[in-house]
């Protein structure tokens, strides 16, 4: 592991767009909280198409409408964080959120905007399956392992977008477009799979990234490889239930692990993953204070300036924490989790302006 502000591309993207990410996120979650649903949704069975059902529940639909603004992706498909200068393909992964919103609202123009973001990302693909990166990043220490991980984040978003579209009313509209991208996806997957051991090593102390990697493979048709990463991630779960990040617990990154495992469970359900989610969520609930604040005492990565991004101390990812509770409430018919999600959002609204 490198020093605290190195070793991952997230620490190397010193761009204006990234600097304002935290502010944008808080603004979005503040807006979304104003439209939060008041009732607990019906229990939803788990299957590939059921993420669509979750997205179309009123609280998620309202949240996505307010949280995923059109400005996040330009008309030409370029992410706002890759404009006016392209930096890294991972910055295009916001496209999956746009596709989620478009499907939730049944709004073709929003889906198209998200899809253009995916297509633009693949326009930066290199002949070996890697992607173009801004040369400035080389001078700032980007490694080949960083590039592997960065591409994996984008492929996870691409696979998620495609899986959603193939289970939605837009299936026929996007069948040909998806087919045209398949050779590019396969090329990048070949490159990633050839370097899978390096990818595992890069994420060895960050199980949330292992789940991203698992989704990148499994959602794109390489479930056998994806399962290797899932098993690696599950092996990082402590007896207390949390996923071990950098040698201990982290109440923010643990929620990210839960959220991505929930996604994996929706598409590739297993009792092993379900039990891991439930155990981890039971621990996560103990880290939510009555006010809705996420308790950061003892965290290994967030809350006490253990790590920095662009010179700013890493803080709790409140939107991901809240969303992990929203999905849990619907997947496991748990009204308490919806209450947690609303409290977490309320805390962010009132304290993180």
Image (cartoon, rainbow, N blue to C red):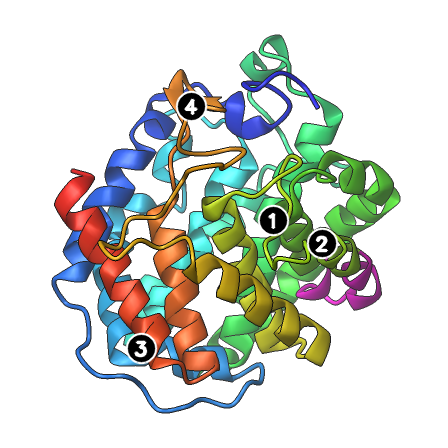
**Earlier-in-chain disc, 4 versus 1:** 1
Dot 3 corresponds to which residue? Answer: 106
Answer yes or no: do the residues labelled 1 and 2 have beta carbons within 8 Å? yes
C-alpha gap between disc 1 and disc 2: 7 Å
Dot 4 corresponds to which residue? Answer: 305
* Secondary structure type for disc 4: loop
> In the image, which residues are magenta?
217-228
How dense is the environment of label 2, judged by Cα within 10 Å: few (below 14), some, or many (20 and up)? many
> Which is nearer the eye, 68 or 165?
68
Is the residue 87 above or below the residue 323 in the image?
Answer: above
Answer yes or no: do the residues labelled 2 and 3 have beta carbons within 8 Å? no
Answer yes or no: do the residues labelled 3 and 1 have beta carbons within 8 Å? no
Residue 223: which disc? Answer: none
From the viewer's perspective, is 316 left or right of 167?
left
Dot 2 corresponds to which residue? Answer: 233
C-alpha gap between disc 3 and disc 4: 41 Å
> Which is nearer the eye, 187 or 245?
245
Dot 1 corresponds to which residue? Answer: 208
**Earlier-in-chain disc, 2 versus 3:** 3
Q: Residue at x 22, y 48 (%)?
A: 348
């Amino acid at each position: 592991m490198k020093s605290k502000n190195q070793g991952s591309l997230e620490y190397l993207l010193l761009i204006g767009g990234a600097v304002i990410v935290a502010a944008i996120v808080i603004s979005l979650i503040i807006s979304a909280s104003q439209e939060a649903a008041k009732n607990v949704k019906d229990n939803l069975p788990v299957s590939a198409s059921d993420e669509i059902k979750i997205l179309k529940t009123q609280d998620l639909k309202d949240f996505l409408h307010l949280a995923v603004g059109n400005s996040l992706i330009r008309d030409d498909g370029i992410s706002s964080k890759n404009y006016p200068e392209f930096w890294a393909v991972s910055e295009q992964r916001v496209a999956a959120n746009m596709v989620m919103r478009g499907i939730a609202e049944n709004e073709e123009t929003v889906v198209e905007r998200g899809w253009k973001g995916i297509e633009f990302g693949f326009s930066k693909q290199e002949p070996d399956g890697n992607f173009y990166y801004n040369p400035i990043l080389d001078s700032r220490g980007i490694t080949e392992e960083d590039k592997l991980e960065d591409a994996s984040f984008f492929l996870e978003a691409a696979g998620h977008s495609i899986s959603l579209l193939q289970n939605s009313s837009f299936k026929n509209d996007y069948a040909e477009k998806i087919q045209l991208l398949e050779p590019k996806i396969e090329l990048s997957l070949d490159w990633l799979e050839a370097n899978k051991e390096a990818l595992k090593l890069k994420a060895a102390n960050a199980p949330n990234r292992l789940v991203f990697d698992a989704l990148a493979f499994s959602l794109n048709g390489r479930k056998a490889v994806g399962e290797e990463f899932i098993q690696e991630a599950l092996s990082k779960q402590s007896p207390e239930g949390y996923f071990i990040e950098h040698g201990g617990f982290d109440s923010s990154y643990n929620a990210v692990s839960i959220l991505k495992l929930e996604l994996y469970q929706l598409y590739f359900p297993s009792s092993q993953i379900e039990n891991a989610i439930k155990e981890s969520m039971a621990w996560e609930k103990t880290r939510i204070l009555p006010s809705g604040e996420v308790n950061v005492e003892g965290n290994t990565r967030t809350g006490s300036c253990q790590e920095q991004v662009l010179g700013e101390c890493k803080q709790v990812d409140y939107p991901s924490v809240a969303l992990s509770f929203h999905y849990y409430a619907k997947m496991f018919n748990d009204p308490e989790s919806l209450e947690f999600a609303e409290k977490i959002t309320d805390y962010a609204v009132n304290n993180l302006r």
